[in-house]
Amino acid sequence: MEKVIIVGGGASGIVCGILAKRINNEVIILERNSTCLKKLLLTGNGRCNYMNENYSIRNYHSENIDIVDRIISSNNIDMVLNFFKDIGLIYKIKNSCYYPYSNQAKMVQKILIDEAIRRGVQIKCNSLVTDIIKKNDTFLVTCGNDILKCQKLVIATGSFAYPKTGSDGMGYEFLKKFHHTIVDVVPALVPLVSKKSYKEWDGVRCDVELKLFEDDVYQKSEEGEVQLTSYGLSGICTFNLSHYVSRGLHDGKREVIKINFVPFIKTLITPWMHHYCLKFPTRNLEEILEGFLNYKIIPVILKHAKLSKNIYYKDLSNEEKLRLCKALSSFPVEIISTKSYDMSQVCNGGVLLDEVNYQTMESLKEKNLFITGELLDMNGDCGGYNLTTCWISGILAGKCIGEYYDQSK
């Protein structure tokens, strides 16, 4: 009877354990929290959007994006869907996201833990691993006052993101001991902090288009709801740009997001505004903007355009009209930092993918060492993309380990 130890009972660790367990091996999950899958409970506002039916590579970020493309193949996506089907999870799809039919992340947590226990996986909670070394063909895992031995080891500790769920980046330190390269880790899916303070619009949610410029060069745009805050920007659109912003700031680049507050205007804004304002000649600028803007945004727009709220559109010079239109359609917000890991959903960076066998998640640096989940240098946009890579990497590692023990009967 040989032993498999999985350090971390998150999404990738738990599915890995389920598939690694065979009659002729012992599988132990060491989880530092009082329960497994703590972070899963936060996904989808507690409803658990655990996958997305649109698994395009455009939704992912990595130093080795070509390897990510192989990892999120259609075969591997089907493998994940079949896994959840086999353990009895019924799903529904809403806005392209897979949700449990119960709408409860708690039930996904329960069904996964129950399945692991049914298969004979030992789950040891409140078990903090502090050191890992290898002697000959045996891994020595220090956990509390004990040193556990195993022949196969899976490190699935998660990144720095959401440290309150137990992710403190210790996994990176373990893997450095086995000579793995760690792409510098920065927060991702995280609110962005602006150079200026915008207390006037704090708390406003509105539909916009965001365009990211890096060193004055256009990078990417997102359209949808943004949350305006006193310190900067938040919301899903912001999060999806934060991968680029966080990495760019780390590399010393200037990051500016330009907000289009009138994305519903599909023609040139200047003639549209001219036509719209002429309909209401007795309204001043503040009253004009009240027709389509949140009242908290209006003073910020007018201040940026250097215009009085009491002036009438007909009295504006051509230059002033252009300033108004530009403030509405291309409002610049310079980003100087991100919020901390406490507010980031995932991290950008991690273990270099070309040091891992993408078909099995086994380290190419150390035999019988497997790396799964957020430790790897692949992260995705909002919408279940990051859980997808956790499921895939955990299942691939678990199947590889499980098939090894099946063959060794």
Image (tube, rainbow, N blue to C red):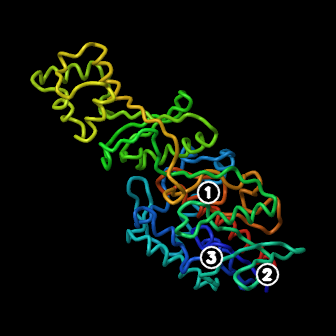
Q: Which badge, 1 or 3, comes first in the chain's sequence?
A: 3
Of labels 1 and 2, the one closer to you: 2
**Residue 43 or 181: which is nearer the viewer?**
181
Q: Which badge, 2 or 3, comes first in the chain's sequence?
A: 3
Q: Label 1, secondary structure: give it.
A: helix
**Residue 227 or 386: which is nearer the viewer?**
227
Q: In this view, does 257 lie to the left or right of 399?
A: left
Q: Residue 310 carries which label?
A: none
Q: Residue at x 72, y 58 (%)?
A: 359
Q: Which residue is drawn at 42% across and 32% down?
A: 332
Give residue 110's position: percent from left, percent from top. Answer: 48, 78
Q: Which badge, 1 or 2, comes first in the chain's sequence?
A: 1
Q: What residue type is labelled 1?
A: Asn
Q: Label 3, secondary structure: give it.
A: helix
Q: Mark 2 points at which residue?
A: 149
Give residue 66's position: percent from left, percent from top. Answer: 68, 45
Q: Which amino acid does label 3 sit on?
A: Ile
- Marks 1 and 3: CB-CB under 8 Å? no
Q: Say above or below: 304 vs 59.
A: above
Q: Label 2, secondary structure: give it.
A: strand
Q: Name the residue under label 3.
A: 18
* Mark 1 and mark 3: Cα distance apart in space: 20 Å
Q: Which residue ends up furthest to the right in the rendered image?
A: 136
Q: Name the residue under label 1.
A: 75
